[in-house]
Image: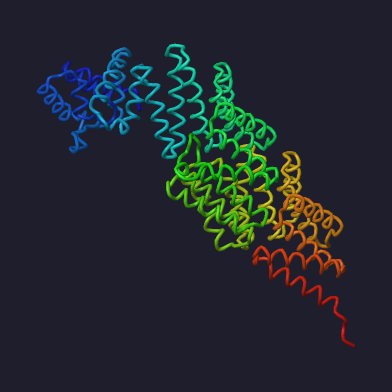
Amino acid sequence: MPATVQAVLAARIDRLPPEEKHLLQTAAVLGTEVSLPLLHAVGELPEETLRLGLMHLQNAEFLYEVSLFPELVYTFKHTLTQEVAYGSLLHERRRVLHARIVEALEALAGDRMAEHLERLAHHTLRGEVWDKALAYCRQAGEKALARSAHREAVGYFEQALGALPHLPEQRAMREQAIDLRLALRMALRPLGDFGRILACLREAEALAEALDDHRRLGQVSLFLSVHFFLRGAYDQSITVAQRALTLATAGGDAVLHELASQRLGLAYQAQGDYRRAIDCLGRAVVFFDGARRYERFGQALLPAMLVHADLATCHAELGMFAEGRTFGEEGLRIAEAVAHPGSLMYASHGIGMLSLRQGDLPRALPLLERAVGLCREADLPAYFPWTAAALGAAYALSGRVADAVPLLTQAIEQAITMEMGGFQVLCGLSLGEAQVLVGRMEEAHALAERALALTREHQERGRQAYALHFLGEITARRNPPEAEQAEASYQQALALAEALGMRPLQAHCHHGLGRLYGQMGRGEQARAALSMALELYQAMEMTFWLPQAEAALAQVEAASAPQAG
């Protein structure tokens, strides 16, 4: 706004009678919406004077009524009017009024305090009522977090941390400093701000160590395990999760113990040690049953849902689809019971990923589309590359390349920006599969090589097996096929898949080798490989790939049959 407009407004306000000017300034401190009961409590004016003053301010077009029920509420005719009236007060007078508003709000709110947390946080900060600012900002942050308003929660937790230096240096305040950093980390996690997350956790770790607070140090260790997992540093993730386990055992903290077991399971899963992961997750799923299944225990997502969803994906990699589906569907039921967006996203991905591995596209697609949709709707950017990689793979497998490529391109760019190595592998392999379908073999090969390098760097043996299989697929499809390189890639993938118990991938490797041997005229080897693929596909009810394997075997049989005449 031009300075002249503000000057005109300031002059109009200055010309008001003193009591009306005081009333307008008090209303400006209350905010853009001015409740009559609150204005009466703060304004220190007789009721008749207040009524006449409001009438005059309305006639002068400073204020107007916006609500009559359940209480009379006014607002400013223009936002600039409120800003100028507020700015006309000296700092100390504003501070006193904000502090008085806090007392009035507390008195008027009664048992409806939760409805006014945001306003109380605002006024305690500006009134410099630091002890109450700490409490109300933290509560407002927790309220925002409960409804998945993560960016709003970040703001409140940062304001609460800003209040701490104004309070006495006591142990209780240092404990609050740790707890607030852990809360801030929870709000930052879905947003993918990993630099700030690590800074929060390292600060909390130093504070907990200085206090010799083993319980809080265990919580910090748990969150550090998650952080290192997401960065692809699985050895570090396991180390700090084991530290959390040790601290939990020493302190008799059963919840922390099972949460740490869950984190260990996730790290083992990422390394391709699916059976060890199932052992860890299986113990946790028993613990988080019954009354605990709907509790968050200070976590971003429901632990009971998490262990069920992760058990589903681990079982899927081993080809144990029936067992995995039982876990996945239960995880989805838990998430739906609380209608928590992040938990619904994770659970949908878990059962959707299992269906994708089995080739059940009619079931996989809506679940994975729901997971990606929730990432976007609930502002969960940190999970987007992970969910989009699965959905893009499902699109590619169903021939929807036009849907797969832009989605996966966006996902891999985001994974690179966030430096999420594991997610880069998932997105790269899915995008590569889509590129093969449109004949972009060089782009696909580059993506496969990059994925393989990342899996070796991060020691992700399961994903390494997938990357090797995909390299075999690409080199086998070249014109002419690079048979020796394709065979070597398939065999390396198969050896890893067998070592890790990845039966679905074993089936795909045998399928690829069978086709390749058929092209090379090695009929006996082709028949053996394709027969093994068919046996595995049938045993695991992976019916999507049966027609392709059967057709390849029939072609081999026809080629080796004696020719008439």
- Where 231 falls versus 213 (above or below)? below
Q: Residue furthest right?
A: 565
Q: Residue furthest bottom?
A: 565
- Where 564 falls versus 157 (above or below)? below
Q: What percent of the width, then of the height, locates residue 65? A: 19, 35
Q: What percent of the width, then of the height, locates residue 320? A: 64, 57
Quarter placement of the N terminus: top left
- Where 230 falls versus 179 (above or below)? below
Type of colouring: rainbow
Q: Quadrant of residue 358?
A: bottom right
Q: Quadrant of residue 413?
A: top right
Nearest the viewer among 359 and 434 is 359
Nearest the viewer among 34 and 521 is 521
Q: Quadrant of residue 219?
A: top right
Q: From the viewer's perspective, is 270 left or right of 121?
A: right
- Where 296 falls versus 401 (above or below)? above
Q: From the viewer's perspective, is 330 left or right of 202?
A: left
Q: How many marks?
A: 0
Q: What percent of the width, then of the height, locates residue 306? A: 54, 44
Q: From the viewer's perspective, is 226 left or right of 496?
A: left
Q: What percent of the width, then of the height, locates residue 515? A: 79, 66
Nearest the viewer among 80 and 432 is 432
Identify the residue at horizontal 73%, vertical 72% (top origin): 550
Quarter placement of the C terminus: bottom right
Nearest the viewer among 343 and 281 is 281
